[in-house]
Image (tube, helix red, strand yellow):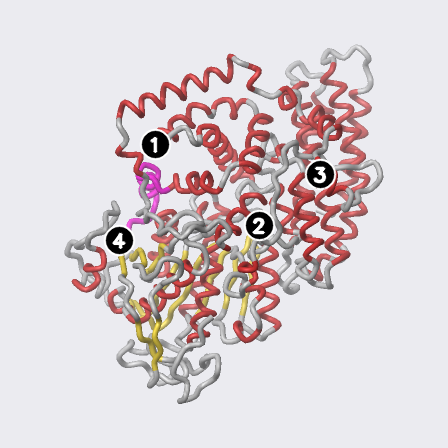
Amino acid sequence: MDYTVVFAALERVCEDNISVLSGPSDSPYGPATDRLVACMKEIQEHGRALEPVVASFTAVYHHYDLDEQTPGNGYRTLVKILHSCLLYIIHKGRYVASNYSGAFFRAEHNASELEAYCGALCQLRAMLHLAQGLLGSNEHGQLFAMQDGELSHRFVQEYNSMHKACFYGRCLGFQFSPALRPFFQTIVISMVSYGETYGKQETGVGMAALSLLTSGKYVMDPELRGAEFERITQNLDLQFWKSFWNVTESDILSGFTKLASTPVQVNFTLTVPPVTLRLPLASDPRLSTTVSPPVAHWGPGPVLMRLVSYELREGQDSEELLAFSRGDPGPVATPRLPWRQKQPRSPWLLIHFHGGGFVAQTSRSHEHYLRSWSKELGVPILSVDYSLSPEAPFPRALEECFYAYSWALNNCHLLGSTAERVCLAGDSAGGNLCITVSMRALAYGIRVPDGIMAAYPATLLTTDASPARLLTLIDPLLPLSVLAKCLSAYAGDDFQTLQPVRRHGSLSALGRDTAMLLGDLTQGASSWLQSFLDPSRVPSRVRRGTRSLSESCAASAGTAAADSEDQIHYPDGFRPLRSESPAFVRPTPSPVVRNPFVSPLLAPASLLRGLPPVHIVAPALDALLDDSVMFAKKLRALGQPVTLTVVEDLPHGFLSLAQICRETQSAVDVCMERMREVFQSGDPPGPGPNGPSPTRPGPTGPSPTRPGPNGPGPNRSGPIRP
């Protein structure tokens, strides 16, 4: 729909409501009518101010796309989100104007709904104003303010100080596909309930039970839910987020996931000891180089991996492979596979690195879609359980993933593959690792993978401002303060030289004493009932709705906000709503994040030339969308093969939501299609690693189309170490 049509419809709806609601002086709804009138007038004012702003964006935002066939960047996304907000207001406004005199009209409810969306519209207006500042400050076609650290710092502190609760109450998920909104409501309610009980229990099941019993008030009171979510994202530490994200790996929840997942014949974990590997050079297979085991921070240590295969293939039941699984206490470990008819080795191998912000989750969290991929692609999958931050900051995860990749090339025959074509796949942090592992393979001069599928990868691990990163103000999965904590942890800002305790994807809560668990349930029930009996637990500013919140924020913007307002100038008469307890987010936390093996967007051409085809799949509503767009632009400028697919109406992390709705499954299908292209492109596969075809090398042989980074040469005998 043309934006001019949307703004014209908004103006008509506001005029109609003001006319209808201002008519009778003896309205039966009393103060609710006054609230509705004031709200519609404020919405009308915002709409009139926003129309020329949107016109300015639509005139230029196509210059920031990758190309004409791939429309997508943060400026487009901000306009799209505003469009979604306005459409809801128009729909609700028409309902109010048509049903105001009806017997079943709920004036208080509708006033609260429109006030919430009015607050959201106010904050979106502020976000678009900030985006205008970026548009005027950045170079043509540039989405990040990387050349102006002070600008990024001001912008980060500005939108961090802005009020966010309105986006997590009644307006929660309005920007996403309608099928996803109930999911986000469930996630946010679970998170705030978990946050209320966080620190009161030692293990997971008791905390989960307590959280379940305290969640009722957040279902009934959206304003309270939004305020509590803002408090959690602003104040709770990284350990809370690690704990919450890892709840999905409890035996109970993962058991439910398995019931809905594709059954596979092979699914067990491997523990690969730290042994030095030797791999042939891509430029001259007569020469070889060594790949040392991971050593960063606490010395050599084993690397954990998971092998998933829909069919049992040759090598997967070998004594040599099963020796790596023995002694693994994981509940899905299979020390010996029952007899089944074995299939021949696949010519393909998929190596997967999971997401989780470098701080949480394992292959178990992502197992449900890995099972589906293995079936649909007919490929064995090796998923790497790299060590997590802050216990294991950079470069430990990269070292482990690169070692796992190298080990897989040498041992593909054990994994049920001849590895004639190898694809790396990962999401978010895992997408970053796919790219940096390939860069490291180039630097070492060994074979690089045949392609990369990176879903919504993090390619710039700094807090530099971009229009898409303004979405951290409203994204329930990637709030700015949480994103900054993850970046800081991976950079090693809070690192202590202690070897982390390895977990195998399950929570210890299942062994909890029964009496302790009953105590948890009793405490939870008491807390839940108290929330209804004691109204003082709900802040009055929240109960009264967004209008009173607007007044209180305007009266008492914090010191940090005041400092920021001295630098960010808004139009006369307009100020965004402010958070009453803004979190301080440091700018780029450490020089480490500008290391090209941390932020590949900052990598020089010498480290990117020679990468395999990179296929990026990014959702339009992702706070990291601009990471994907700018990295694709950089690769294309270097002449590197790259594709970018932007999927609409979906959030960051859609791979983990594959089974929720048709839209997420369609996006997952796009990812599978990109991996299929990697496997099926190029020359026909040869007979295997021991007898490569003349046109296609085996898994450890040279690539005629991708020599080593220094070109072919018999004198090259060692790696370039990053």
Pick whichever of labels 3 and 2 is earlier in the sequence.
3
Where residue 644 sits: x, y (%)? 56, 62
**Image quarter for residue 117?**
top right
Assign a secondary structure to mark 2: loop
Amino acid identity at mark 4 = Phe
Mark 3 or 2, closer to the camera:
3
Q: Is residue 616 left or right of residue 69?
A: left
Secondary structure beneath dot 3 equals helix
Q: Residue furthest bottom?
A: 714
> Would you name the residue on which mark 2 appears?
622
Badge 3 local density, few (<14 within 10 Å), some, or many (20+)? many
Distance Cα–Cα, label 4 vs label 3: 51 Å
Magenta-drawn stretch contains 506? no
Which residue is label 3 attached to? 561
Mark 1: which secondary structure? helix
Residue type indicated by callout 1: Val
Circle 4 is placed at which residue position? 268
Point out the stretch of residues depicted in magenta: 249-268
Label total for image: 4
